[in-house]
Amino acid sequence: MTENASAQSGAALAGDPSREPMVRVENLHHSYGTGTGAVAVHALRGASFDIRRGELVALKGRSGSGKTTLLHLIGGLDSPDRGRIVLDGTDLSELGENQLLELRRDRIGFIFQSFGLIPILTAAENVGVPLRLRRADPHERDERVALLLALVGLADQAPQRPAELSGGQQQRVAIARALANRPALLLADEPTGQLDAQTGLAVMELLRAVVRSEGVTALVATHDPQLLGLADRVLELSDGEVIER
């Protein structure tokens, strides 16, 4: 989507918060290696696009094209050199570090290729970590954990530790954990990268199902063409710009 197209879309939605996109990215620029003696690498060069509420959007691009950088910027883990990111009506550039921390904790769920589970905790305890950080009521926490493990098909694996689970099961636990705080947005960075093709497809189908059942929006970075067909839309990151396919 071009910058002009994004602006026109914003004008059409103005005044109607229910129709505003969940994510709006406007003219985003980000570079690495701009210090003394370093050669700048331009990861993003004016990227602009919207993600509507309730969509599952796939982000494709070759290795090193900037997919992870873009996810980190949208998730408030890094700041752009130039441009604007609006998440659920909130301009990230206007938030301080504590506000960004609260946003990541309460409104965004992260899913990583490496699963990121805590080895000494059970599946149920891993899913419950975000709720403990929020000091949720223990009864409410236990109910939410049980619901999510059932949602991802792992109710019987609740007492097992990560080492006792397959890769696909570990990623399912990671998905359940990302949903614990009822986020508005899921950001997934190559979530099937460590899985075989069949397991990866099952995990992507699960992601699509939980997006529908939990009413969340998801942006999934992947290079697997088999998974792209499960998305509502596909965005391609090429030469620092985002193009809809």
Image: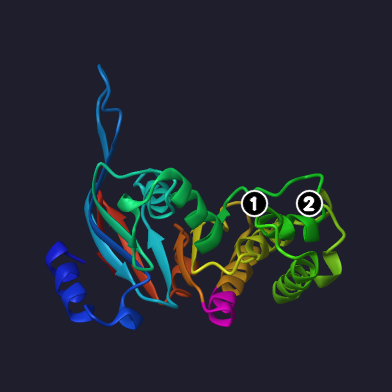
Q: Residue furthest left?
A: 4
Q: Is residue 160 magenta?
A: no
Q: Quadrant of the N terminus?
A: bottom left
Is the Cβ of the residue at disc 1 closer than 8 Å to that at disc 2?
yes
Between residue 190 and residue 104, name the one nearer to us.
Answer: 104
Q: Earlier in the sequence, mark 1 or mark 2?
A: 1
In the rendering, which numbered label is found on residue 49? Answer: none
Q: Name the residue under label 1.
A: 115
Could you give the CA–CA distance between mark 1 and mark 2, rounded to whole angstroms? 10 Å
Q: Residue at x 42, y 76 (%)?
A: 55
> What is the secondary structure assignment of the residue under circle 1?
loop
The chosen color scheme is rainbow
Q: In this figure, which residue is indicated by the disc labeled 2?
A: 162
Residue 46 rendering spot, x and y as whole percentages: 20, 52
Q: Please state which amino acid type lies under the numbered disc 2.
A: Pro
**Label 1 neighbour load within 10 Å: few <14, some 14-19, many 20+:** many
Kindly identify the amino acid type of the residue bearing the numbered disc 1: Phe
The quadrant holding residue 91 is bottom left
Reply above or below: 128 against 205: above
Residue 113 horizontal/vertical position (percent): 57, 51
Q: How busy is the neighbourhood of tag 2: few (under 14 within 10 Å), some, or many (20 plus)?
A: many
Residue at x 49%, y 68% (from the top left corner): 227
Q: In this view, does 228 lie to the left or right of 109?
A: left
Identified at 59% across, 81% down, the residue is 213
Residue 124 spot, x, y in % from top left: 79, 61
Instruction: Decide: is 160 above or below 44.
Output: below
Q: Is residue 81 left or right of residue 181?
A: left
Q: Quadrant of residue 42?
A: top left
The magenta stretch spans which residues?
A: 208-215
Name which residue lies at 74% across and 55% down.
126
Residue 189: in sight, yes or no? no
**Label total for image:** 2
